[in-house]
């Protein structure tokens, strides 16, 4: 359901990887800590990036701004 939008041009690379991480949680709401649990996987996928956690937060903000996520509390997110 969440990934049905992945054919949109802005949803490639990092953003698609973050969407896949969120999708694999199989939850409507989730925590930043849960997304951080994918840090080592994302580091392997993006070896050029040494700032994985800030990049995760940036991508979550992008998904919020595009209407895919809602921030419901500090460190808590919900699929829109």
Image: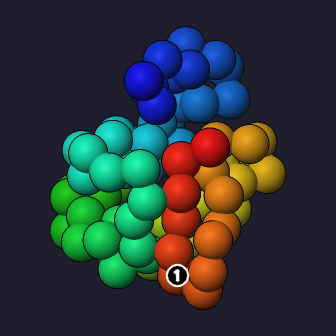
Q: Residue at x 30, y 71 (%)?
A: 34
Relative height, residue 12 to residue 53 (above, below): above
* Scheme of image coloration: rainbow
The correct choice, above or below, for 59 with respect to 24 in the image is below
The location of residue 71, given as percent across then percent down, is 65, 67
Image spot of residue 60 (x, y percent): 59, 60
Q: Residue 53 appears at what percent x and percent y? A: 45, 77
Figure quadrant of residue 52 = bottom left
Classify the position of the C terminus by image quarter. Answer: top right
Residue at 68 percent of width and 29 percent of height: 10
Residue under the point 25% across and 64% down:
38
Tell me the residue that label 1 is attached to.
Answer: 75
Task: Answer left or right for 40 relative to 54.
Answer: left
Q: Which quadrant is the N terminus positioned in?
A: top left
Task: Answer few, some or many: residues within 10 Å of disc 1's Cα (few below 14, many 20 plus, some between 14 and 19).
Answer: few
Instruction: Point out residue 6 in the picture as x, y percentages from the top left corner.
Output: 51, 22
Residues 68 and 47: in front is 68
- Classify mark 1: helix, strand or loop: loop
The vertical placement of 49 against 53, above or below, is above
Q: Is residue 48 visible?
A: no
Residue at 57 percent of width and 71 percent of height: 57
Res. 77 in view:
yes
In front: 28, or 41?
Answer: 28
């Amino acid at each position: 359901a969440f990934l049905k939008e992945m054919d949109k041009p802005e949803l490639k690379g990092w953003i698609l990887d973050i969407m896949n991480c969120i999708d694999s949680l199989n939850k409507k709401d989730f925590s930043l800590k849960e997304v951080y649990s994918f840090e080592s996987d994302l580091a392997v996928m993006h070896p050029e990036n040494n700032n994985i956690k800030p990049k995760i937060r940036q991508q979550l903000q992008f998904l919020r701004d595009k209407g895919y996520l809602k921030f419901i509390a500090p460190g808590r997110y919900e699929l829109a």
